[in-house]
Image (spheres, helix red, strand yellow):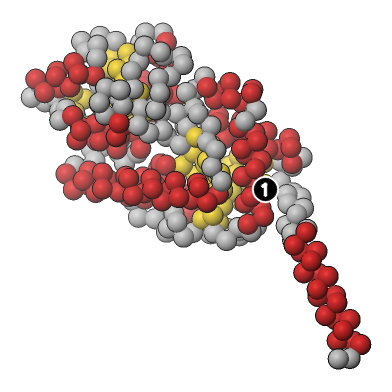
Amino acid sequence: MSSQLRTLLAVLMAQAVLGLVFPAHAEWPDRPVTVVMPYRAGGGGETMVRLVMQQVSQTTRQSFIIENRAGGGGTVGASYVAKERPDGYTLLASGVGSIVVAPLFVNVIFDAMKDFTHIALFGGPPPALAVNSAFPAQTLQQYIDISRSRPQGITFASSGYGTHVHLMAELLKSLTGANMLHVPYNGGGPAMADLIAGHVSSSVVSLGTVSQYARNGSVRLLAVASPNRVRDFPDVPTFAELGYPQMTSVTWFGLSSPADLPRDIALKLNAEVRAAMAKPEVIEKLSAEAIEPGNLDPDGFTQFIRDEIVRWTPIAQKVNATTRPAASK
């Protein structure tokens, strides 16, 4: 073996060893990172995403910029990210709405399991069943009984056709036989406004959206989809304790990137997010919105999304086969 060849082999071996100790992406991030929020500013989940990414920004000493790209139930922003470079500088605030539920109702250019690297789970607020304060039902069973006694059923508002909360309501109908008429809106805010005004009788809605109105008595909560009772609403039972464990769910958000993100970046981001969500001040702020922080590694989060797709696909198929969307309000 020539001396030149021996020198070349020595250099390559040294580079390989250095690569194991110091991954090629060890300096990430060395410039601002964009996190695409696939909903309008101020929409569901944005407060949580901003809170966590601010903590990550402090520890990495780099800016994480939230960019709103709304449309298509979150699929416009998701589609945009799916086509970007997997270098860790364009991320998606992914969620059950944008990458699990909405693609079951609209055509999308991405595959949630093939076109993304799923990094970390933030968590999210549970949906709740709320009624107008003048509505006679005080319990879930009374709500079901009243719905069955009315030929036209009980109207329920949602933040839109083909959303997570819409599917939660459809699941409730399927489990209980309740006679419920869907009235879709363009967002949770307009749905809540009409619920408070009495234009609709009920709503399956994110607890984060309805909590302030439940506190001031504008609406009444009959059940919540969290695994356990919510600290701020200890008198509101969970669906599970009322006999419907299938109704346990949260409107979750997480962090994803275009497919093939380098593993070291995914692991670093996952560790940063989990550390941020473990801080007492973050836990306290999230608890006020009934959000239990997620705590999954990238592989666990990826399996979680796969399970969510399996869970919601047959429900969406049933909705598509039996209902047609009315004009959104």
Considering every residue shown, the one lying at the far right of the view is: 3
Q: Which residue is mark 1?
A: 268
Horizontal side of 312 relative to 125 (left or right) equals left
Relative vertical location of residue 301 with respect to residue 46 in this rendering, above or below: below
> Percent from the top left, x then y, of residue 117?
54, 54
Residue at 50% across, 46% down: 301
**Residue most extreme to the bottom:** 1
Tell whether 70 sits left or right of 120.
Answer: left
Which residue type carries mark 1? Lys
Q: Residue 213's image quarter?
A: top left
Q: Position of residue 176 (x, y in %)?
A: 18, 29
Task: Find numbered disc 1 in the image and state the secondary structure of the residue it sits on.
Answer: helix
Crowding around mark 1 (Cα neighbors within 10 Å: few <14, some 14 to 19, many 20+) is: few
Q: Is residue 198 visible?
A: no
Viewer-nearest residue: 80 or 27: 27
Residue drawn at x 58%, y 25% is 283
Rendering coords of residue 39 (x, y %): 48, 39
Residue 300 seen in this snapshot: yes
Q: Position of residue 81 (x, y in %)?
A: 54, 53
